[in-house]
Image: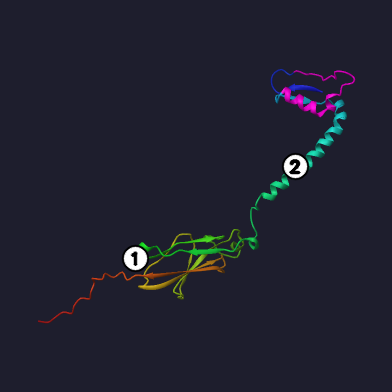
Amino acid sequence: MYLSCESGPIKTYRYVCRSQADTCLYKNPARLLLLQGIIGARWSIHILESDMRALAPLLAVIVLAAAPIGAIAQTAVDAFRPPAVLPLADESAPRIVGYPALPEPLARGVVIVQFRTENFRVIPVFGKAAAQVSPRVGHLHVTVDDGPATWAHTSEDPIIVVGLPPGPHRVRLELADPTHKILATETVSVTVPDTRSPNATAAPPAHRH
């Protein structure tokens, strides 16, 4: 067995047992580790071929002891690591929450409805292949007063409706997957005020003189 330095002049040392009764270094792993700590990281311990035969049983024991520890550590890490992608069947159900129309624009007759989604992203994608994406993606179907007209809302921006007559209205928001399958529904009730000036009156009829 000999030692070598990683940089600078290389010096070689041969380990010799202090006495016939002394246990050789390679038979005492504690001494081997102590020697490595004393000489520092810049020095390396080299084992001669003749010494390797004596060290073989010790190395086998070290390898066998280290293998279960590594396996246990890896298992423990995997147990607490969440999966990168969840199958669609295991995902929580999507949900949409609609908020009351913003009061300031509503006073001018403009309906602005904000919303948020859970377990669902609103992006402009369509088709059967996109329906298999995880986490779920899709768009909104927006309908006013259960009318025949429905439009697709494909972003997370607020929904804006203008031109509604004064009075109560309902804005239905539906979460739809890329194949337009409805996954969740929310309805927001709103009352559009009469924005006409109270001083505005019809022009009087013209009088003939």
The picture places residue 46, in percent across and down from the top left corner, at: 79, 25
Q: Position of residue 208 (x, y in %)?
A: 12, 82
Which mark, residue 107?
A: 1
Q: Assign the N terminus to one quadrant of the image.
A: top right
Where in the figure is residue 124, as x and y percent of width and height? 51, 61
Mark 2 lies on residue: 70
Toward the bottom, the furthest residue is: 208
Using the image as rendered, state which of residue 81 and residue 56 is in the foreground: 81
Is residue 78 left or right of 116 when viewed as pictured? right
Q: What amino acid is labelled 1 in the image?
A: Ala
Image colouring: rainbow
Q: Which mark is residue 6?
A: none
Amino acid type at circle 2 is: Gly
**Span shown in magenta:** 11-39
Question: In terms of secondary structure, where does tag 2 sit?
Answer: helix
Magenta-drawn stretch contains 14: yes
Measured from the top left, where is residue 118 in percent x and y? 54, 60
Q: Residues within 10 Å of mark 2 (few under 14, many from 20)?
A: few
Within 10 Å of disc 1 (Cα), the crowding (few <14, some 14-19, many 20+) is some
